[in-house]
Image: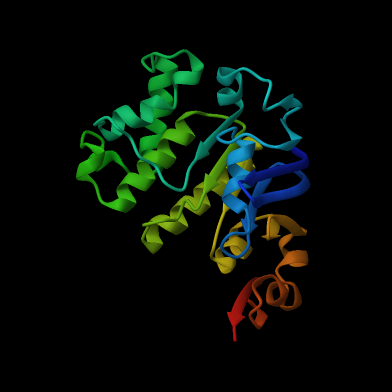
Amino acid sequence: MITIDAVTKTHGALVAVDDVTLDIRPGVTAIIGPNGAGKSTLLAAVGRLVGTDAGAIAVDGRDVARTRTREIARLLAILRQDNHLAIRLSVEDLVAYGRFPHGGSGRTAEDRAHVERAIALLDLEAVRTRFLDELSGGQRQRAFVAMAIAQDTPHLLLDEPLNNLDPRHAVGLLRLVRELAAERGLTVVVVLHDINVAAQFADDVIAMRDGRVVHHGPVAEVVTAEKLSELYETPARVVEVEGRRVVLWE
């Protein structure tokens, strides 16, 4: 469980996250909203990549701001929207970095098992020995996701993980996320711009605008024509196709 209590984050005069209070349950939760809504900032605050100006965030009852870094890294893994490394690494070495919170070496039998599993799950076998700067954007993205999965945490935070992915790998990643959440009871929070993807793969949806949460609940409650039209200031229709909600922008 992730608990966010009256959290505010400012960037100068800009209020990026404005007095947000949420309880995020196990399963897949998608954060949606227009550009500048505060989605990525909120996710970064949960992952302790940025500090907050007010409020508190707890992961499984542990205060994120006061818990030791290694302990936090055993509780949650985060994939940022932009990933840059100053050193040249192979895919295999990058994925092994995900094991550092569990001891630092990345070379134990358990570590190797997690690394091998993550490489296989993200379809990276063919490029495992190649350097990141030799890969396509989609391959690099999958490598960073594999590192997060190798970290083997009960909470997984993904900021726009579908960047640069073709349809096959995008759908495969989201199916994998759903399977991991179901099999292991994970809490997965994912920032998405595609509302149809959120409606298909998420259990709950958080809708943000101007730094505030305007809607939070199951897909059926949040993905409605009225709420989406107001959120994005664009007329929307929501239809059912084979039991799935599909948004049509007008």
Between 207 and 108, the one lying in front of the other is: 207
> Can see residue 127?
yes
Residue 8 image position (x, y, % from top left)? 72, 43
Residue 245 image position (x, y, % from top left)? 65, 72
Query: Residue at coordinates 36% horizontally, 39% vertically from top-left?
Result: 120
The colour scheme used to paint the residues is rainbow
Between 66 and 32, the one lying in front of the other is: 66
**Quarter that holds the C terminus:** bottom right
Q: Looking at the rendering, which quadrant does residue 33 occupy? A: bottom right
**Quarter that holds the N terminus:** top right
Q: Looking at the rendering, which quadrant does residue 126 occupy? A: top left
Question: In the shown orientation, is residue 176 left or right of residue 92?
Answer: right
Query: Residue at coordinates 33% horizontally, 52% vertically from top-left?
Result: 138
Residue 131 image position (x, y, % from top left)? 22, 36
> Can see residue 242?
no
Query: Residue at coordinates 59% horizontally, 35% vertically from top-left?
Result: 47
Question: In the shown orientation, is residue 70 left or right of residue 231?
Answer: left
Relative to 73, is 208 above or below? below
Query: Residue at coordinates 77% horizontally, 47% vertically from top-left?
Result: 19
Between 149 and 43, the one lying in front of the other is: 43
